[in-house]
Amino acid sequence: MAHLFSPIKIKSIEFKNRIVVSPMCEYSSTDGFANNWHLVHLGSRAVGGAGLVITEAAAVSPEGRITFADLGIYKDEHIAKLKEITTFIEEQGAVAGIQLAHAGRKASHTEPWNGGKQLQPTEENGWEAVAPSAIAFSRSETAPLELDKAGINKVIADFKVATERAVKAGFKVIELHGAHGYLINEFLSPHSNKRTDEYGGSFENRIRFLLEVIAAVNEVWPADHPLFVRLSTTEWTEGAWTIDDSIALAKILKDKGVDLIDCSTGGNVAGAQIPLKPGYQVEFAEAVKKQADILTGAVGLITEAKQADEIIQSGQADMVIMARELLRDPHFPLRAAHELGHDAKWPVQYERAKW
């Protein structure tokens, strides 16, 4: 039996297999709008057999974008094209998910292929970034504006309204981006959060912002729809966020209605030394799953069918969340099914090519 292709039901939503298209920034939007690039990019991975297709990070506000070319969900006008995309994904038998995000101090940059440099508010397409503390990500960048309580409340409200739009657009899964050095991660980590109010200092204070975002989201997100949270489960740096912190947080999130932790690492500490190797983050998904008793998704240099299947079979994680391999091969799930001896359903238009 190919464990990678066993269905899984989370709340009311059933996924036909355990393969997830990870959120991958495309930097191909104008004013946050999805377009035909997103339709084809996401739709082709649904055609290719993934069980869940998650959009790239969709900014909950214009100032929450990493770049001026990011996808957004901060206008009602964004809904129509997103609805077209979710409809197509579902027509292929996949589930449509969206990652809601705020870039925090990592906002206001150029696209990676144009250097990825920070843009100042005085420059074209630039604006002032915000964060829990006025600490720049790296020495070469300008410090962000520290959020006051009114600013924090605005961001929480933005997440709530974005969730309402996600419902109207037809998404069945929301993932909150709490990883990779973006705003939620910045609040969680003692490396980037030096506040002295109720949002800083102790572990309980540093997780407060995320818990308030979740509470706001849950006011409008259907109770029978899955809610995921992506965490950088370690920052690979002494004195920063750790796997023990992630496990403690995951236990709390489970009681707050979160169904799955997408277990990534890093991104909040410039220059952190990360020991890259195939499956290098899977151990963190396993630790969170077993010690917090919550569903997890494994990520990180997962490129082969047997490797992905063993992650599920061994109980290290409940879903395999793939990025670069699915950029290289949108039909990886169909190929993986063949390699694992599983008779996956192909689109009828492609059946004449089936192995």
Image (cartoon, rainbow, N blue to C red):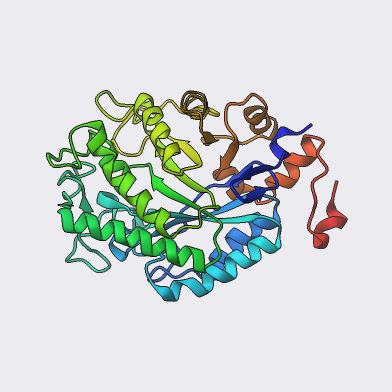
Specify the quadrant of the image occupied by residue 6. Answer: top right
The front one of 278 and 85 is 85
- In which quadrant of the rendered image does the N terminus lie? top right
Give the number of callouts: 0
The front one of 184 and 112 is 184
Place of residue 57 in the rendered image (x, y in percent of width and height, measured from the top left): 43, 55
Place of residue 140 in the rendered image (x, y in percent of width and height, measured from the top left): 20, 45
Q: Is residue 322 above or below residue 108?
A: above
Specify the quadrant of the image occupied by residue 342. Answer: top right
| Residue projecting furthest to the left | 196
Residue 67 in sight here: no
Q: Is residue 206 above or below residue 48?
A: above
Q: Is residue 234 left or right of residue 107?
A: right
**Residue drawn at the location 36% of the way across and 24% of the way down:** 244
Place of residue 205 in the rendered image (x, y in percent of width and height, measured from the top left): 22, 37
**Residue drawn at the location 28% of the way across and 46% of the way down:** 209
Q: Is residue 342 left or right of residue 137?
A: right
